[in-house]
Amino acid sequence: MLLKLAWRNLWRNKRRTLITMASVLFAALLAIFMMGLKEGSYSNMIENIAGVYTGYMQVHKEGYWAEQTLNNSLEFTDSLKEILLEEPRLKGYAPRVESFVLTSSREFTKGAMIVGTDPEMEDQLIGLKKKLIAGSYFHEDERSVLMGEGLADYLKLTTGDTLVIIGQGYRGINAVAKYPIKGLLKFGSPELTKTLVYLPLKEAQWLFGLESRLTSIVLLPEDPGNTERISRRLKKRISGDYEVMTWKELLPELDQMIESDRAEGYIFMGILYVIISFGIFGTVLMMLAERKHEFGVLVAIGMKRLKLSFMVFMEVVIISILGAMAGMVASFPLVLWFKLNPIRFGDELNEIYEEFGFEPIFTTSTDPAIFLTQSVIVFILASVISIYVFINLSGMKAIDAMRS
């Protein structure tokens, strides 16, 4: 009966109900958008660096990452390949040979990272063809390179020109060669665009004298959220001289930066929740003030204050549920719009972000957990605030209320 009365009371005064519901709706919408913006920026950073270059996981010889020398290369055995193929949550893998070299053209020289990879596997892994902005993609048996646009600009090179590579190979041999530039690449991370040079895997193995050896095997999970779980399972199965590392272990600086920024975000969201709470509290006070005479009459004719308080409490809870659900629905188009049309910074902020190696954009995340979590938090805040109803009505005097 009390639930039915609460529902009917809501729609006796539709204007008041809609105003109260709107306060919860906008609170949920604001919280979802702010959190979606922060999580979207983190996901974009991880995707632009870990997803494109290091991968979300790597398998390499134990101790390789500490020194990153070709002498710590590994053999890609059939047993290791079988383990990777049997992992159902892996989307794919790409064998790589990586090394630092000196790139040169006429009077210009610059340090760069050579990435020798299987062209087709690398494209399946990170969509390398989509990063191509000039020229054409290379093939497995070609003697040509793809290089970052930023590096090419520094060396004053373009497609069809020749790139000279000078480095050190396996066990100290000289690694010197020159290759025609077949295409230019542009990555989300400006730092990668200024650093990377791609070679076909066989050519890179020849250049560094590695024959059939690799420096790493980059793994791509179907869902990046399962990275830690897949890593733990592979660590149990892959033994011996191999080690499995996630992007958090490969890039601890990026992980620490995100976590520290996320902690600052929690403080900001806490302040936002306080502001939201005062907004919802104001609408509850308005509702109690408008209905004070009504409450006095109900108590005067014999309705117990506890039942009256519980009925009004249920009204606030119902409004909170409807407002939170409406906030989820209303926020989705907004969040989706900014995901498809990210905010791009102006020239000054653009330069600052590029100095730190990040793409100068703000995008949002459409992770369902963000919508659900923020809506639940706003609902809990509204429900806690509605406890004031019990406090207010328990001390209410019927005669004074009817005279108000």
Image: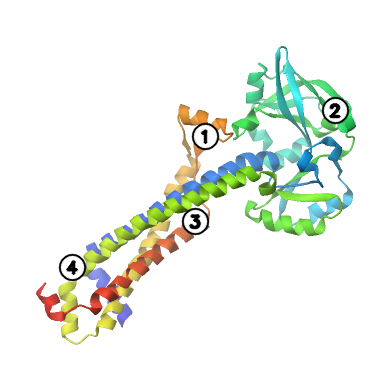
Tag 3: Cα neighbours inside 10 Å, few (<14), some, or many (≥20)?
some
Percent position (x, y) of residue 32?
44, 53
> What residue would you read off at disc 2?
207
Instruction: Pick out the residue farthest to the top.
Output: 107
Cα distance in 3D space between marks 4 and 1: 50 Å
Tell me: 52 left or right of 339. right
Q: Which residue is mark 1?
A: 360
Q: Please determine whether, in this image, residue 150 is positioned above or below residue 281.
A: above
Q: Where does label 4 land, which residue? A: 290
Residue 383 circle label: none
What kind of residue is marked 2? Answer: Leu
| Occupied quadrant, residue 391 | bottom left
The residue that disc 3 covers is 370
Q: Measuring 35% from the left and 70% from the top, which residue is drawn there?
A: 317
**Residue at left 66%, top 48%?**
248
Residue type beneath disc 3: Ile
Sooner in the amino-acid sequence: mark 2 or mark 4:
2
